[in-house]
Image (cartoon, helix red, strand yellow):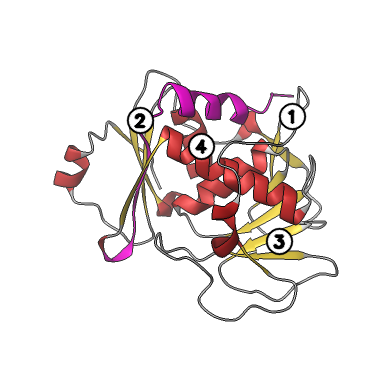
């Protein structure tokens, strides 16, 4: 089983890429968000601590991610993997936590629902929440920006579960570009979240940068040149 690479990747982000861009997001209406390695690691640490302290996740918990391709989706994926959880990108049997921007009512007995507002400047979920739902956007900033949870056991290599009653997919099976030196990779939403996640892991493991574009967003060529994009993930 391939070991979970995320703790090592996060260590590299907060040390070797501390002040250089690790993730650049282009969203609708011209929104641009740039996260340095240290800032990205801080977001992941806060989310990991939130997941442990507020949601009681532990290694093996299935976290169902109902988010579009977005920088916060990548933060949640890294946080789930840092805490030893298995990420589900579709409805999964046995998911204990569902992270969503849409349906806030629990879909199964005991399911914890986490509401995520996507705009970068959002400070809370825009509206009322049903009983039991947790407002990630309002609460996450109060958590420590260094990871305080337990280290993962060696050999934990399960990354994704594709759907109900399917076996987990190891990190080694995630699609990713060929290994090499650092690159600046354009990753469009149209490539799909699973493929984007695999590409992000590979890119960050070699000290590179992900330029992520939202659904339907066409980043101008002059902008890609300014961002020094050297590779593109095919949809």
Residue 181 on image: x %, y %: 37, 18
Front label number (4 vs 1) = 4
Q: Which residue, given by chain and number where applicable, does mark 1 sit on?
A: 152
Residue 182 on image: x %, y %: 36, 22
Tell me, yes or no, whether the highlighted magenta stretch contains residue 133: no
Left or right, 84 with reference to 18: right
Give the magenta part as a residue range.
1-29
Tell me, yes or no, whether the highlighted magenta stretch contains residue 20: yes
Q: Earlier in the sequence, mark 3 or mark 4?
A: 4
Residue found 24% across the figure and 52% down from its top: 219
Q: Which residue, given by chain and number where applicable, does mark 4 sit on?
A: 41
Q: In 3D space, how far apart are the residues under numbered discs 2 and 3 (Cα atoms)?
A: 37 Å
Q: Earlier in the sequence, mark 4 or mark 1?
A: 4
Residue 235 on image: x %, y %: 40, 48
Q: In 3D space, how far apart are the residues under numbered discs 2 and 4 (Cα atoms)?
A: 11 Å
Residue found 53% across the figure and 52% down from its top: 73
Q: In 3D space, how far apart are the residues under numbered discs 2 and 1 (Cα atoms)?
A: 26 Å
Crowding at label 2, few (<14), some or many (≥20) Cα neighbours within 10 Å? Answer: some
Left or right, 123 with reference to 27: right
Q: In 3D space, how far apart are the residues under numbered discs 3 and 4 (Cα atoms)?
A: 28 Å
In the current view of this chain or complex, which residue is farthest to the top?
181
Q: Quadrant of residue 113?
A: bottom right
């Amino acid at each position: 089983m391939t070991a979970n690479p995320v703790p090592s990747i996060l260590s590299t982000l907060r040390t070797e890429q501390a002040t250089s861009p690790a993730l650049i997001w282009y969203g609708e209406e011209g929104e641009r968000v740039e996260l340095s390695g240290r800032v990205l690691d801080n977001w992941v640490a806060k989310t990991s601590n939130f997941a442990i302290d507020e949601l009681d996740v532990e290694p093996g918990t299935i976290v169902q991610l109902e988010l579009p391709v977005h920088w916060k989706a990548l933060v949640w994926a890294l946080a789930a993997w840092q805490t030893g959880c298995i990420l589900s990108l579709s409805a999964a049997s046995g998911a204990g936590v569902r992270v969503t921007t849409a349906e806030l009512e629990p879909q199964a007995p005991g399911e914890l629902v986490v509401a995520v507002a996507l705009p970068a400047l959002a400070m809370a979920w825009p509206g009322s929440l049903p009983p039991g739902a947790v407002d990630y956007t309002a609460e996450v900033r109060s958590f420590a920006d260094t990871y305080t949870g337990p280290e993962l056991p060696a050999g934990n290599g399960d990354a994704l579960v594709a759907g109900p009653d399917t076996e987990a997919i190891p990190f080694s099976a995630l699609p990713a570009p060929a290994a090499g030196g650092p690159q600046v990779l354009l990753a469009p939403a149209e490539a799909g979240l699973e493929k984007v996640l695999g590409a992000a892991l590979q890119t960050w493991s070699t000290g590179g940068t992900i330029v992520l574009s939202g659904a339907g967003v066409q980043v101008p060529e002059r902008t890609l040149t300014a961002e020094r994009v050297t590779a593109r993930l095919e949809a």
